[in-house]
Image (cartoon, rainbow, N blue to C red):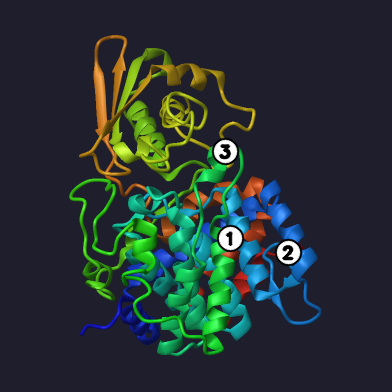
Amino acid sequence: MPASLSRQLAKWVYELKYQDLPPEVVDKVKGLTLQSLAGALMGYKLPAAQEALHMIKEEETVARGGSTIMIDGAKVTKAGAAFANSELIHASGKQDSYRMLTHPGSTIIPAALVAAEAEGSSGKDFITALVAGYEVMERLARDFIPSVNARGFHAGPVFGIFGAVVPASKLMKLSEDQINSAIALCVNLAGGNLEGPRSGGTMIREPAATRNAMLAVLLAKEGMKGGETVLEGDAGFYHAFTGNNKGKLSYVFTGKKTTSFDRVTAGLGRDWEIMNTMFRIYNMGGYNLPHIEVTAKLCADNNIKPEDVERVEAVVNWLETLYPSPAFPTPGGSGARVGSTYYYSAYGVVKRGYSLLARAGAGSDPPEVLEMMKKVTIIPSKTQTSLAPKITIYTKNGKSYAAQATGREFMWGLKEESRRIRDVVPGIPISKSQFEEIITAVSGLDKLPKADKLIQLTLKK
């Protein structure tokens, strides 16, 4: 009888070594680390982040030792630091994104930082643990994301807890059995419901998942057993969160509505899913990013001015028009409005780009963008690849110009991330020179004797 899904993953995580990682994977995880650190810096001054920091410091400050809250420097419990640092990233909107609806770095990196600080882990160990977290989370999530959202859950925190538990377990030197239990215990602690925002409230998202992951790690370290078939079993994770444990899917981006649990571990350690993680560099839903890039480039390449435009058409993957799920679309979320796909397509035409500091709906929406978005038509398609809209701009002189995204425009490495992310400097609470120190440290992460230097470099001076 084959080993359980959690057991196969635990064994791979336990045995993974830095030497097993291809250079492009190391480069990718460096870029993702930089993105999350920049996101934390951007999120620091925002109300949600400040509320989280205040609560954690009030309730979980420790007299000695403890884990560090980035930027602020307060020492709190491991779970408290994991929660607060995750909220810093989450509040900013500058997360990474995987298959539209999950944000791995906002759980993986805060949990890894807490564990690395506690254990004095090297940069190489930190990198290895991060890669393990991305691979496990994304493989568990890959085929099942729309089906989880169709059950009324948000796939981000539901799968994010697994992303967080893996690097923390590895850095805290848990055994294979303990890692298996930590993964299994996450099934009891996973959650995140969609109804809050639909009824005027909020939902508990990645920060709580990160906090709960630390609880799972510490329980497993103390010897608590999580079980063997808690992921794929008859009453297990997939049954609870997708409706069955047979690989039957409620919705898919494209293709057949079936999958197999064998796909989760197929090619593990050979085919690196982390390479399919995108950098959500702008403060918008990840599926909107290509609209900015493609539309702006079309206008720049063909010298199309806003006053020349008759209309804009965008053919997009159908699930991108029904966020967060066709079963539970955002009330009043369709149509041309600030922050919609219409808005960002119009922004690309009018401004030929988007600022890393901009936040739609913050009171500075350009009137010409609001006017242009009335000319945008969004066409949903069940065959169009996610993140790969086909944009056609029709001009008043009867001409048309078309281009299609590849879906990989925002799946770059450290060099491109370093080039782009520097534009956040005017909006962060540290100096330009200090931010350059962070970029340098991330670039040489594999050479750092202690990875917690990354935390220290974020602290306000």
User: Regarding mark 2 in the picture, which secondary structure is present there?
Assistant: helix
Which residue is painted at 30% across and 35% down in the image?
Answer: 316
Label 3 belongs to which residue?
199
In the rendered view, does 180 fall on the left or right side of 284? left
Residue at the extreme top of the image, as rendered: 397
The type of residue carrying mark 1 is Pro
The type of residue carrying mark 2 is Ile
Camera sees residue 17: yes
Q: Is residue 368 above or below residue 381?
A: above
Q: How many marks?
A: 3
Q: Residues within 10 Å of mark 3 (few under 14, many from 20)?
A: few
Label 2 belongs to which residue?
56
Which residue is painted at 30% across and 79% down in the image?
Answer: 4
Question: Which mark is in front, 2 or 3?
Answer: 3
Camera sees residue 448: no
> Which is more N-terminal, label 3 or label 1?
3
The type of residue carrying mark 3 is Ser
Which residue is painted at 29% across and 49% down in the image?
Answer: 250
> Which is more N-terminal, label 3 or label 2?
2
